[in-house]
Image (cartoon, coloured by chain):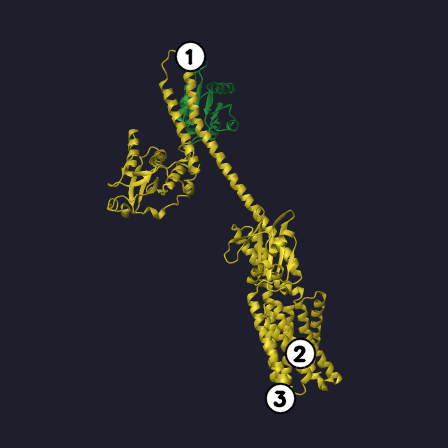
Chain colours: A green, B yellow
Amino acid sequence: MPDLRILVVDDEPAIRDTVSAMLEIEGYEVDMAANGADALEAVELALPDVIVLDMRMPVLDGWGFAAEMRRRGHRVPIVVMTAARDAARWASEIAASAFVAKPFRYDDLIGAVERARADS
Amino acid sequence: MTSLELISFINVVLFVGLFAVVLRDALRSPTRAKLNTALFFGSLAGVLVLSRLAQWTGFSADPAYPGLIIALLAVAPFAMVRLVDDFSHSPGWAQVAGAVGFVLLAGFALVAFGAMEPVVELAVVAFFLVVGGYAAVAFARAAARARGITRRRMTAVAVGAGLFIVAISIAFVGAFLGSTAAEVSSIVVQVLGLAVAFAFFLGFTPPAWIRRAWREPDLRRFLEQSIHLAGVTDERRAIAQLNAAAASTFGARGATVGVADRDRSVLRYVAQATGDWVEYPDDRFIAARAFQEQRRVVVANAAREDPENAEFYERVGAMAVIAAPISTENRRIGVLTVFAERMSVFAEDDLWLVDLLADQAAVLLESRELAQHASSLRAREEAARLKEEFLSAAAHDLRTPLTVVLGQAELLERRRQRNPAAPADAQGLARIAREARRLSDLVTELLDAQRLEQGTAVMDRAPADLLDVVEDVRERYEEGGLTVSVDRPALSLVASIDRPRIEQVLDNLVENALKYTPGGSPPQIRVASHEREARIEVVDHGIGIPEADHGRIFERFFRASNAQSITDTGLGLGLYICRRIVDEHGGRIWFEPTPGGGTTFALTLPLLAVAAGHVADEPPQWEDDPEPMTARELPADA
């Protein structure tokens, strides 16, 4: 397993922690951010290989984050992670590489991250 | 030819012309009113023609001539008395007196004129004045009672009758004066006579174009109102206005629109006196006949035609009734009934008009029904949309803890598979427990809201000291490491409450205060009493509630627009539940900005009348409040 950096963005700490724990077991290196604005800072600090992104967040939401990151010239593949029924539509709206709908299975998440990584 | 001769000649021509028009109308479609009108004009035209012929032929010198003229002239007042009855109510004795007077006068004049000339002349003048006066008063009263076109017609006739008296008086006085005065009075009398004739003509048999012109403003008002009424929400008011507009258009005593209730076989009317609905079986009244047979029904004597309801028709002063069904192509909507004192009030084209108005009413009633249907559909759609929104919000809120529970459980499983010897992941287990609790709280909240909505929330109420309740809440937060300061009076405040529910309300308010005060000072609880009420306030210095959301903050599923920026979770049920609980306790809940920023939620609860002196001794806490809160109180159901 290559040493991949994943950025997990979610305003719910419990979700953030759970997703991070899953990814860490699989050997990924994980960064976390509580919203789009924090995530932008994290991206500037260290460019991740894949971003796991919640869509509805305070301060800066998933749409705003994706647009701003790309405006800044970063092309990081995104996995949309949302509790909404619109997961697929939202994913295509921001041209994400993959999506998982909460509540998701462990393997679904890892699969989505791997697909996104292959996308880069 | 002198000017007097010219006027006389024109007078004769016009009278004969009017007589011809009236007679033709009367012969074409004879009614009593038309025949009486023809009789009136025939009398006057006959007198004028006869006197002219007599002058030419020398018949005027014949001793029988004056008697004949007087007998012929006496027909006019006789016809006038009958016309009063044709257009409004006239007592039987007046009719009999008119006929008797006419017969006596005419007979006397024909037989004995030569012998007692002055007596007959006096009798003629007296008869004319009495009848003219009676007619003038009767028509003036009819005009006052009537509306629309009938009012105009009766006014014209009353004016005519008044002029008739004036003309007779002048003629009488002129006859006693010198020849010059007699000549002048003769001109005046002839001109007045013409005016009388025109007034009667307009009133009794107005030509179609005048009827149209007179009716036009009322008809226009009816049409305008019927368009406007489609938007009037109160159906009773809409129908009452339609009734009045229809009555005015006909110049009738009254008009009623009956609306069919198909399920119950009744026709609903709006009572004029009370403005309330009255229902009658749909086989009662002449209206019902028109409704059942789906055709126009015209009745000249309603009491005779429908004896069962004779008392009703007499009470409303309606002898003539026209009823027309209000229907669309495939639906019977109701019936329009127009009541008039006498059939003569209606003209032939009123039959056409009643159909037109019934059609217009059909359009109006149907469009009202459609509009109501549409708005109930909209309401149902709105309810469905709210439910949809709620379900998706609920699903979202349930999914977050579910994701954590499932994810952590799978993590535990994986860890165990990879390293069975590793110690249990205490943090993961704690997370599962916490999120499971959160799930359970959410489900409870959803069920609470649902139960409160249906009004079935159990309310086991018992007397409790509100200060104890508040103290419990404070202690609970203190155990969790949060300081909630409490400002309370010394004496107890006992209210009959469902204690767990009131605690739930306070918890909710305190939690909101904590949640929406990012990194700020902890909330404060203030308790006080005022008269028979306890007042509890939860004061925070948080982000406040945007002005635009003030009216909706207690609505179900509503979340303030700035709440989303704090947390994405929350169903928008908390304050709704608080409001319902406080409502059910007979209290009020509202909020206002905290001076210096933040929000103060306040609620009142009725106090129990405790042992005398106990609460009353307490000085009212609110008197020295710099800004009485009631002044800016928001309605709890906003």
- First-in-chain label (1 vs 2): 2
Query: Callout 3, which amino acid?
Result: Gly
Instruction: Name the element at disc 1.
Output: helix
Chain at tag 1:
B
Instruction: Name the element at disc 2.
Output: helix
Q: Quadrant of the N terminus of chain B?
A: bottom right
- Mark 1 and mark 2 residues within 8 Å of each other at the beta carbon: no
Residue under label 3: B178
Q: Quadrant of the C terminus of chain B?
A: top left
Query: Callout 1, which amino acid?
Result: Arg
Residue B54 locus on image (x, y percent): 73, 83
Answer above or below: position of B348 versus A8. below
Residue A45 locus on image (x, y percent): 41, 23
The residues tagged by marks 3 and 2 sit, at their Cα atoms, a distance apart of: 24 Å
Q: Is residue B301 left or right of residue B479?
A: right
- Pointer 3 and pointer 1 on the same chain: yes
Residue under label 2: B73
Q: Residue at x 63, y 84 (%)?
A: B121
Residue B367 locus on image (x, y percent): 58, 48
Chain at tag 2:
B
Chain at tag 3:
B
Label ID, residue B418: 1
- First-in-chain label (3 vs 1): 3
Q: Nearer the viewer, mark 1 or mark 2?
A: 2
Q: How would you rate the neighbour count of disc 3 (Cα within 10 Å): few for under 14, some for 14-19, many for 20 or more?
A: few
Residue B451 locus on image (x, y percent): 42, 35
Answer above or below: position of B627 versus B52. above
- Mark 3 and mark 1 residues within 8 Å of each other at the beta carbon: no
- First-in-chain label (3 vs 2): 2
